[in-house]
Image (tube, rainbow, N blue to C red):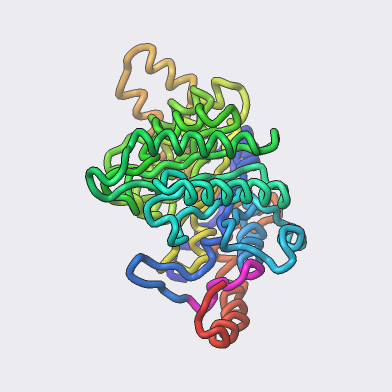
């Protein structure tokens, strides 16, 4: 094995209440995380990558089977259709022990969205985009999903290209119409992104704009934080604490970045930042006396890593970093703050972050009937080889196209 095999040790390093909270952590995995992907320069092919929605469900089930933490798979409204429609999709997921998670509209691929979707100068394009969003709400209802995730690629590339305030109003009107069409059981999560594909201005460029749009849309709209969609140096835990206190934190897309918008594996670049984000969540939950109603989702581009391995690696890393955050003595931390003891306050965080929880989590998984080391279990299962054997002939027969 090209990585260290961790030997289990006592679970006593993690308190019982922390393990109970960890057991309630569900992480939604994305269908698009199992297909062949790449960059704007090209697609990188993997033998075992999924072709169809059924392949994606198989892969998602493998992740859930080994981690016990991923019972939902997110779908893209245009990428994940089945011949039998929504009922077939639900049945296929259920047969694998899964549920369909968030529904993600696609307002960025069609040629008509070249100059924007809900902010396009052409009213017929704006209406087409809203119609697609409304269809996505209907799809979510049909698959019993409670979450619509809205990310817009809308923006401009050159000064003078668009009337920014008018585009803002069009976006607000569209989101309000879609929100009003949702059933009371559904929520809308609005994602923001500072740049790419728009490089002069992006219509929903940061958390403050996303919160403003959400409040205007209606009471069931919240903000989605994609952890890779921030400019260098952004204090993401500050955003988390602020939105949680405002009751506007709806969910996360787990990933990581080095420069900005890299969609790398969670914790691969700055695990201490992810840990601090979880500390902010723990503080908010401690103040409320209950779990925050947050959707935890993965959104990463596994161009080079094997798809399932990268997904398992992410889930395990998230569990480890959340467990470390749960070790922070919040009462002692507040006592240090009250005395303005800056050094002691920081040391409480550093001590928890430095604690090796891997062995304890191995024991915890084994006690729950799961593989102690999910990544090792996957590599020894021969799943990748079987998937490649099944999918390569289908890729060849389709001329290398992907569904």
Magenta segment: does it hold 51?
yes
Give the farthest residue toward the left: 159
Is 384 or 325 nearer to us in this picture?
384
Q: Is residue 110 left or right of residue 366?
A: left
> Where 318 sits versus 289, above or below?
below
Give residue 92's quadrant in the image: bottom right
Q: Is residue 350 visible?
A: no
**Residue 238's spot in the image, x, y percent?**
38, 29
Q: How many marks?
A: 0
Q: Position of residue 292 (x, y in %)?
A: 58, 31
Q: Residue at x 35, y 12 (%)?
A: 339
90 or 10: nearer the viewer: 90
Q: Position of residue 185 (x, y in %)?
A: 70, 36
Above-or-below relation of 102 to 180: below
Task: Examine the rendering and report whether any part of residue 182 can be seen.
Answer: yes
| Residue 286 among magenta residues | no
Q: Which span of residues is magenta-colored?
A: 46-55
Q: Residue at x 49, y 23 (%)?
A: 245
Q: On the rendered image, what quadrant is the C terminus found in? A: bottom right
Report the residue at 40% width, 68% height from top. 38
Foreground of the two, 257 or 282: 257
Quadrant in the rendering for residue 338: top left
The answer to whether 328 is drawn above or below residue 171 in the figure is above
State whether residue 348 is above or below residue 49. Answer: above
Is 201 placed left or right of 16 in the picture? Answer: left
Residue drawn at the location 63% of the way across and 66% of the way down: 53
The secondary structure making up most of the magenta span is loop
Observer-nearest of 70 and 160: 160
Q: Position of residue 105 (x, y in %)?
A: 55, 52
């Amino acid at each position: 094995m090209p990585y260290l095999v961790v030997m289990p040790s006592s679970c006593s390093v993690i308190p019982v209440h922390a393990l109970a909270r960890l057991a309630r952590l569900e992480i939604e995995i994305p269908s698009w995380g199992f297909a062949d992907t790449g960059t704007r320069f090209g697609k990188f092919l993997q033998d075992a990558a999924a072709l169809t929605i059924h392949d994606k469900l198989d892969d998602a089930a493998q992740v859930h089977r080994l981690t016990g933490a991923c019972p939902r798979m997110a779908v893209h409204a245009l990428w994940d259709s089945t011949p039998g429609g929504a009922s077939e999709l639900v049945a296929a997921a259920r047969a694998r022990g899964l549920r369909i998670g968030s529904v993600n509209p696609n307002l960025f691929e069609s040629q008509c969205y070249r100059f924007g979707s809900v902010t396009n100068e052409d009213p017929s394009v704006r209406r087409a985009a809203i119609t697609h969003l409304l269809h996505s709400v209907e799809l979510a209802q049909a698959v019993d999903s409670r979450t619509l995730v809205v990310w817009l690629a809308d923006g401009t590339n050159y000064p003078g290209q668009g009337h920014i305030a008018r585009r803002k109003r069009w976006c607000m009107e569209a989101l309000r119409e879609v929100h009003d069409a949702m059933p009371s059981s559904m929520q809308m999560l609005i994602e923001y992104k500072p740049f790419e594909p728009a490089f002069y201005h992006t219509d929903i460029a940061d958390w403050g704009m996303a919160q403003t749009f959400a409040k205007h849309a209606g009471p069931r709209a919240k903000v989605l934080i994609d952890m890779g969609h921030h400019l260098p140096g952004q204090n993401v835990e500050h955003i988390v604490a602020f939105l949680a206190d405002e009751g506007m934190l709806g969910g996360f897309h787990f990933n990581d970045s080095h420069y900005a918008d890299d969609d790398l594996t969670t914790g691969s670049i700055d695990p201490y930042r992810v840990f601090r984000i979880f500390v902010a969540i723990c503080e908010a939950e401690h103040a409320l006396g209950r779990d925050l109603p947050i959707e935890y989702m993965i959104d990463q581009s596994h161009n080079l890593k094997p798809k399932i391995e990268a997904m398992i690696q992410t889930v395990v890393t998230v569990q480890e970093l959340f467990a470390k955050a749960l070790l922070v003595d919040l009462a002692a931390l507040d006592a240090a703050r009250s005395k303005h003891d800056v050094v002691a306050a920081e040391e409480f965080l550093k001590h928890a972050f430095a604690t090796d929880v891997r062995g304890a989590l191995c024991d915890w998984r084994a006690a729950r009937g799961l593989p102690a080391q999910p990544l090792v279990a996957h590599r020894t299962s021969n799943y990748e080889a079987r998937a490649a054997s099944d999918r390569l002939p289908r890729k060849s027969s389709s001329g290398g196209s992907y569904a």
